[in-house]
Image (cartoon, helix red, strand yellow):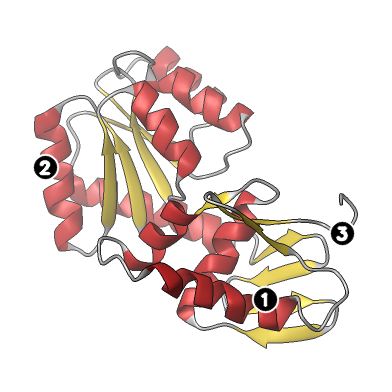
Amino acid sequence: MKLLLVEDHQDIAEIIFDYFEIKGYVLDYAGDGHLGLELATKNHYDLIILDIMLPHMNGITLCQTLRTNGLDTPILMLTARDSEKDIIDGLEQGADDYLVKPFDLKVLEARIRALYRRKTGSIATRELHFGNLRLDLLNRIVIRNECHYKLNKTLFIIMKILMMRAPEIASREELINEIWSEDQPEDNVLRNHIYQLRSLIDKPFEHAYIKTIPKLGYQLIDEHTE
């Protein structure tokens, strides 16, 4: 699971990083609201841990901005405040849950797992849709018209990011970081995987969904918007 932590207290951030990295989570970090907005907008995360009291842009404003921009990533707010107004403000601006500092890391992890299950499991949708494409999130199957294609892990991640970003561009950097993390591949590796994906969902059909945006990345183009 990939998390974004937006927290201006370095000591708290380090404690959270140490706990979750040992358990196999991948984390990115922002120490202020502006950087948090930039990372959350450019990259895909399974969940965002968001402090309310932040420099430059507070957590409630950041949450509101992300929701206004259409981002539906689960957001768990952290706050040193425990007033009813702070809690209500956060939830009304789109946060999914909250924890009041100080908190137990095991409780934080339990909340994160619950939100993730709600987003990706039986409670939430099991499919992503774009045009005539459907992506079965549980079985790693992409469906176009009545054709079903089983995807390996890498192709599934690429397809998931493209569909979550559609019709916006998914950058090469985002795709590479999500698949390989810090173990950067050779330049042509991602291109080869895109070719494999095109061979499945585009070549047998008249309309090609996957479009290359030179020097930027890839995007899905619906046949009705060309």
**Residue 30 seen in render:** yes
Quick check: marks 3 and 2 in contact, CB under 8 Å?
A: no
How far apart in space, not on screen, are marks 3 and 2 (Cα)? 48 Å
- Is residue 139 something one can see in this rendering? no
Query: Which dot marks residue 31?
Result: none
Q: Please give the label number shown on residue 15.
A: 2
Are there few (<14), some (14-19), or many (20+) residues within 10 Å of tag 3?
few
Residue 23 lies, with reference to residue 31, above or below; the image says: below
Q: Residue at x 11, y 50 (%)?
A: 18
Secondary-structure class at tag 1: helix
Say if mark 1 contacts mark 2, CB within 8 Å: no
Q: Which residue is mark 1?
A: 198
In the image, what residue occupies the spot 47% across and 18% down? 61
Q: Is residue 86 left or right of residue 181?
A: right
Q: How many marks?
A: 3
Q: Marks 3 and 1, Cα distance to the nearest angstrom?
A: 15 Å
The image quadrant that residue 94 belongs to is top right
What is the C-alpha distance between the residues marked 1 and 2?
A: 43 Å
- Residue 183: x and y in percent read 25, 67
In the displayed structure, does residue 50 sit left or right of residue 224?
left
Q: Secondary structure at mark 2?
A: helix
Inspect the image, locate mark 3, and give the three-letter code of the amino acid beneath it: Glu
Q: Secondary structure at mark 3?
A: loop
Q: In the rendered image, which quarter is residue 162 located in?
A: bottom right
- 127 displayed left or right of 100: right
The residue at the point 21 percent across, 28 percent down is: 101
* Amino acid on which disc 2 is placed: Ile
Mark closer to the observer (3, 2): 3
Q: Nearer the viewer, residue 54 or 103?
A: 54
The residue that label 3 is drawn on is 223
Marks 1, 2: nearer the viewer: 1
